[in-house]
Image (cartoon, rainbow, N blue to C red):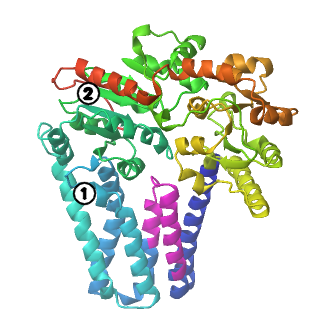
Amino acid sequence: MRGDLVRKLQARVLTTGLVVLAFLVVTLTGATGWGMTITVAALTAAAVERRVRPKADIAAETVLIAATILVAYAHRIGPSLALTAPLLLGLVLLVGPLRDASAHENRAANLPVRTWTAAIGTRLDDVLLGLLAVVAVAAGLDLPVWVTLPAVLLVVAVSGAVGLKLARGRFRRPSAGGGVGRAVRLHQPEFLLYFSAPPGSEYQVKMWLPHLEQIGRPFLVLVREPEFLASVAAATRAPVVLCPTIKGMDEVLVPSLKVAFYVNHGAKNSHCVRFTRLTHVQLHHGDSDKAPSANPASGVFDRIFVAGQAAIDRYARAGVHLPAEKFVVVGRPQVAGIDVRRGPVTTAAPTVLYTPTWTGHHADTDYCSLPIAETLLRGLLERGVTVILRAHPYTSQNPASARQLAQLHGLLSADRTRTGRKHVFGAASRKLSLAECVNRSDALVSDVSGVVSDYLYSGKPYAVTDMLDLGDRFPIDFPLAASGYVLRRDTPDAGAVLDLLLGQDPLAESRWATRTRYLGDFPADSYAERFLTAARQELDEQDTVMVPAPRTADTAATT
């Protein structure tokens, strides 16, 4: 996340610097060719900044760029310039408001509805940058102004059509609804999966999509951030609807809906929980001993689906006391594809899955082992281990973690070249599902994370890193560690721990008992059925067909 801030600052400085330089070159020196070359570079930098900062306001920069181009054309004063100048400046001033208004429109994928207004409106900034680049090149080549006039008129026409469509939508009767709302009504969904999260969090919702599809009832996925629309839609056949505002949600939460599922404790969950006629069910996006897994915010949900009794105990241990009837033990359907193998590692050339987590938002939730990972990996390589390195998706957001991960990739690449061992890391590890990684491995080294409880289903040995230096308190605060082998932050006994992990495995029986407490005691051949049965039961119990009424629909602020 600190890395994101650095990249955003660099992009801002580069764009602003080039824009000012281009203006000064043209106005003070009259060097049109050089000025327009710098202008095109500034426009390129602005386009890059739009990728790094999707919500960046570059109105001031585009106004100055347009002024620079018009100054370059000053020697060609005539009717074409008189028409082009106000159109170009008008576009520069209006594109921002049109983009912002379009960003508040509902959009959808996997639904038979056209949402061209929002799709085009949100890209008008990019269109404007392209148009300015065309006009700048023409000015740099000293081409007549009328050469660029058709392009300017085309963009003006498109922007006008977007503005007209948006204006009609603003004056539409609320009862009439928009195209997305009408399409959702025709779909008749019985439940929705609600999702709001920071960029890069798609894994949280994707892990649940196959299991929600198996429920066998029509549903939709409701996302609140635009970056998730395409990626989530590609992972399911179900409709995916983007609702950037609370007003947009009022249109999409149709009378046929009965249940809303959630996969995290995002702040915007409250925007959906306010629909009190729905049954609200928290699924989580993994079962771990991390502090956020016992979030007091879980109390707002009608049901909390948990993997096993350990999750219920975790809330109580954290001082979060919730009514017992809120909890429903459903197992972890995601582990149904994991092969079970009890007993120690028997192969002479084992494969170890290493899954470092991210640094978290706060120091007391920084369980990331990347600072000691090189020592751990060298210990594994010395024992002839093939490594599958699967880092947390948020790792790249921390520059230090990203550098540490790159060093590990280099270490594994060098060892693969030297020994021929087929280590899996980087993009290759993301092509495999977690279940596939588990099935390919003989043991696990992980930080405190949901990966450990999923791996527990396999019955195979695992080691957990104690990055908080808790010592004897570690297995008390993180009970999963009691059935695994603990690797201390200072790693004084790392070699002995790895030998136990890959050798005698004296914790095998203890681990099997922990498996039942964390993941439920359900038959392996029908393990995932417990979740499906519980989900269908919630749908069948919620038999009302009345429109879900929000408590504060009239006063809620748009986001």
Measured as percent of width and height from the top left, residue 71 is found at: 44, 80
* Three-letter amino acid code at the position of disc 1: Thr
Q: Is residue 417 above or below residue 467?
A: below
Q: Which comes before the other along the chain, label 2 or label 1?
A: 1
Q: Is residue 167 above or below residue 264?
A: below
Label 2's element? loop
| Quadrant in the rendering for residue 368 | top right
Q: Which residues are magenta?
A: 37-65
* Residue highlighted by disc 2: 553
Q: Is residue 72 above or below residue 345?
A: below
Q: What residue do we see at 58% from left, 42% from top?
A: 439
Q: Are marks 2 and 1 in contact (CB under 8 Å)?
A: no
Relative depth, front residue between 181 and 213: 213
Magenta stretch: dominant SS? helix
* Residue highlighted by disc 1: 117
| Quadrant in the rendering for residue 76 | bottom left
Label 1's element? helix
